[in-house]
Amino acid sequence: MNKDNIFEIFRTLMAIVISLILAFIIIFFISKQPYVALSKFLLGPLSKTRYFSNVLEMAIPLTFTGLAICIMFKANQFNLGAEGAFFMGAVTATIIGIKFSLPGLIHPILAIVCGGIIGGIFLFIPAFLKVKWNANELVSSLMLNYVMFYLGIYIVNYYLRDSNAGAMVSYKLKTTALLPNLIPKTRLHYGILIAILMIIITYFFLFRTKWGYAIRMVGFNSKFAIYSGINNKSVILYSQIIGGIIAGIGGATELLGMYSRFQWQNLPGYGWDGVIVAILSRNNPVLVPIAAFFLSYLRIGADLMARITDVPSEVVSVIQALVIMLVAAESFLAKWKHRVIAKKAIEEIKAEEVNMNEQYI
Amino acid sequence: MKNEILRMENITKIYSNGITANKGVYFSICESEIHALVGENGAGKSTLMKILFGLEQPDDGEIYLNNSRISITSPSLAIKNGIGMVHQHFMLVPSLTVAENVVLGLEPRNKGFFDYKKAVAITEELAQKYNLFVDPNSIVEDLPVGMKQKIEILKALYRGAKILILDEPTAVLTPQETVELFNQLMHLKNSGHTIIFISHKLNEVKQISDRVTIMRNGRNVGVFNTSDVSENDISRLMVGRDVVFKLDKNIKKLGKTILNVKNLNYTSETGKKVLKNISFSVRGGEILGIAGVEGNGQRELVEIITGLRNYYEGEIVIDNIRINNLSIKEIRELGTSHIPEDRMVYGVAAQGTIEENIISDRFYKKELNHRILMNIKKVSDISKDLIKEYKIKCSSSKQKVSMLSGGNIQKVVVAREFSSNPKLLIADQPTRGIDIGATEFIHKKIIQLRDSGTAILLVSADLNEILEVSDSLIVMYGGEIVAYFDDTANVTEEELGMYMLGLKRQSHDEIGRVIYE
């Protein structure tokens, strides 16, 4: 690992520490029992297996959307449609789970594959608009999120709604479709294995295949890529399609692992959180699970704090925002980095001078 | 000895990427002198001047103006202290008039409104006083480069500059414009100004400067009265060894025609006719140079041949294949290599490693892939071989290109483009802004390629380079070919200058000799 990466990791940790300190100051101001609140916030998730399992459960969807966004950001495509693709992936899995009768194993696999395909098809749209008419993918993918959301809601509420249930939810999925739990007495499901597999595939895809190479070169400098003969239009297309596929798979996995019926009436927000994960991990698939775990830990910790003490869980949103601002500020600590480099260089120069003088003598 | 006006002591500057540009540099200039600052690219001249002009902050050291210490944290402070700078790339607003550009930021006002008449009067008065004749009412974008430079100088003078820094002012000028500039500089010197003249053209340094400071590797390696040292002395100090200026070239063995450009016309997005009826050919084993002041269509020509630019009229044939509808990849697969004009824009992905940059034209090929995964070992082996062959100074093949010096970055580009055994090489400013050692190396490699039968099109703003490296040459002016010389040995720089400025042009038949079948 080179020095730059070490510095980046250090800088990210510093950003996290500073934002936590700020969060503590806020907690001290608003809480009558700050010490209890703090300990719940920081240590709560570790206090029970169930809580820790909650952290891992939440990290699974964050890993998927984080990876999806990683690939798109690596190609310098600011497609934010992972949110909608995740949602549509879950809707697709619901359809397959309700309408199809298949044996164990095959049922969830089909549901997840279809979820991925649908996610890929949707995120192809902003990519196509960009290649064809140079439409900004950020704007079109943001708009597309509404299309995907309302389309999904429409499908669930009009075709799959269980009118016997008390709320706006779908029928129950066939049990053959659901992903079984991995550890008894928790909700941690086999999706975590799919997530781990996806991390490995994404890493190899980005860093060991020619397609991943092309994505990275377009992301570094698209003019250079074009000059070298790389077809940057196809890179723009397939990077976003693959992003959509991963997000769709994530949505399907989340639904089959955590729920027995479709019950979202709002966007669950994992796509947005995926952006945070991608930024924290510096678009590196290997760091994605760590970032996802961190974010999920903060969430669960804040949840516990809010449940047991008088601090509202909104505080965690404040902390998150602070972390992201500090991490995203690329020049944060740049002066300090410069001073370290300068100091070392000045020492080297002095040593060089001594050498030169000795030569003269 | 005249009075010292400004002194920089022990200046050290380290960039955040770890590159040390200045190491304890001492630099001093006197009142009304022309002081040349010479050194190879990367020696630290530009950084030292950026510090003096407040564009960069030193990590160590002091600056004294008239023996009192000052700190220059911004260009506006530099200007307040009477220091002005004319950059290599002009900072003018192209759509405004000369007078508007001169007074920009310090406009004369009348009842709160911009007083254009006053601006014109100011410009005229300054022009008169310093012998820098310009038309205050013309629009800057219509003016030739030499004129733009005068406007930059006037701008600095209007802001009260006593010390003028000129960063490689002659790099963009024709020989005739250079003579004119030198006259103006002498005039400025005689009126009490001090001029810091950054250059690596030693004949010019000898010709114009009173004293010379030589830098190498971020250090000041000597200050002399220019009359006391010879060009050879200076170059030895600059490079640290003797430099052979002459290239050894064998007699050319010409092959068949590789590149054929026929009746090429191109109109830019803004509706300007950039290329007019261009026809020429390059044969295997031949280096055809294109001389011309920048902006006379060379860039567009190169971009069209390499496939970066479309929507042109005419025909381009490479090795008997018409390339008009081919993609860049297909053109490259025909055996075309391209050293781009600006290496940082097109030539490299600076955040990528050396390996990643070296394989960008061949990463998809079978020999670098095992089924779906890339053959990392092969990639690394190829890169290591090329690093050795091209003497790229780096810590490993996985180092980021942004950490290399300009010359080494260019060597990465050259290594990639030369190692694909090209039939046709388009070299656009192949040695711009790199040190003498690397320049020499790249020139030798170009000639090696020529000897192995590659057809080479060499575009350069550096007349020395054109005359020395190419076998034959064409001159472009206003989007046309205005001259063709089948042997560069019979051309002088002055003669070329006449064609480059559009003062002379050859007959249709003479130019037509550059077309073969």
Image (cartoon, helix red, strand yellow):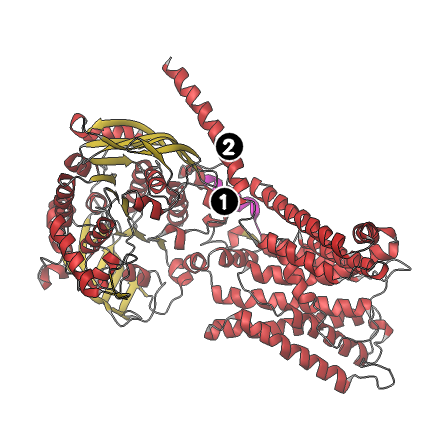
Query: Depth-wise, is mark 1 or mark 2 nearer the camera?
Result: 2
B345 or B226: nearer the viewer: B226
Give the answer, above or below, for where A349 lies relative to A323: above
> Which residue position is annotated with label 2?
A343
Q: Which disc number belongs to residue B400?
A: 1
Where, quadrant-wise, is the N terminus of chain B in this rendering? top left
Looking at the image, residue A332 sits to the left or right of residue B510; the answer is right
* Residue drawn at point x = 75 percent, y = 82 percent: A156
Residue B475 image offset from top left, x and y in percent: 17, 56
Chain part drawn in magenta: B372-385
A73 vs B3, left or right, is right
Mark 1 belongs to which amino acid?
Lys
Which residue is the extreme one toward the top?
Answer: A361
Q: A100 or B148, which is in the foreground?
A: B148
Which residue is painted at 48% across and 64% down in the image?
A232
Q: Nearer the viewer, residue A242 or A264?
A: A264
Badge 2 sits on which subunit? Answer: A
**For the residue labelled by badge 1, is the local secondary structure a helix, a strand or a loop?**
loop
- Does B302 sit above or below residue A172? above
Specify the quadrant that holds the C terminus of chain B: bottom left
The alpha-carbon separation of the residues under discs 1 and 2 comes to 22 Å
Mark 1 nearby-residue class (10 Å; few <14, some 14–19, many ≥20): some
Question: Does the magenta run of residues contain A345?
Answer: no
Name of the residue lying farthest toward the right: A185
| Secondary structure found at label 2 | helix
Q: Position of residue B277 (x, y in %)?
A: 20, 68
Q: Position of residue A287 (x, y in %)?
A: 66, 51
Residue B255 lies, with reference to residue B232, above or below; the image says below
Q: Say which mark, if any, is on residue B276.
A: none
Q: Is residue B517 among what the camera can see?
A: no
